[in-house]
Amino acid sequence: MKNLLDSLTPEQQLQLVFTKDSGGNTALHYAAQNGHTETLKTLLDNLTPEQQLKPRSIQNAEGKTAYQEALRQT
């Protein structure tokens, strides 16, 4: 995953992290739902500190944030 992200421009990385599917899920939601903590870390590490705040409030169609999805996996 890290190699893939490193090959993207910063704009493409942002688009990958913040784009939602039809269920409102982002890449962060999917990583959290499936327990992929290293992927979550890699996705967030490629964001600036200011950009890292935004994903915490993005909700999917069920009203869940990626953080809430990660908590359900523990």
Image: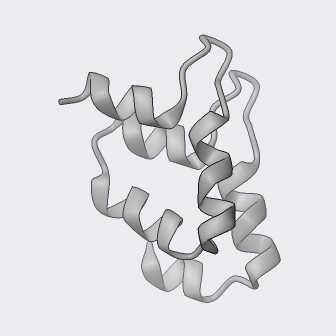
Determine which quarter of the picture holds residue 74: top left
The structure's colour scheme is one colour
**Between residues 45 and 31, which one lies in front from this camera angle?**
45
User: Is residue 39 left or right of 71 when viewed as pictured?
Assistant: right
In the image, residue 65 above or below residue 46: above
Q: Looking at the picture, how far across and down is residue 52, in whole percent?
A: 59, 60
User: Is residue 52 left or right of 18 when viewed as pictured?
Assistant: left
Determine which quarter of the picture holds residue 39: bottom left
**Between residues 45 and 8, which one lies in front from this camera angle?**
45
In the image, residue 31 above or below residue 29: below
Q: Looking at the picture, how far across and down is residue 23, in whole percent?
A: 69, 21
Q: Residue at x 56, y 76 (%)?
A: 46
Q: Which residue lies furthest to the top in this view?
A: 62
**Between residues 34 and 72, which one lies in front from this camera angle?**
72
Q: Residue at x 61, y 14 (%)?
A: 63
User: Is residue 30 left or right of 63 when viewed as pictured?
Assistant: left
In the image, residue 25 above or below residue 18: above
Q: Looking at the picture, how far across and down is residue 31, in whole percent?
A: 42, 46
Determine which quarter of the picture holds residue 67: top left
In the image, residue 22 above or below residue 43: above
Q: Residue at x 82, y 75 (%)?
A: 11
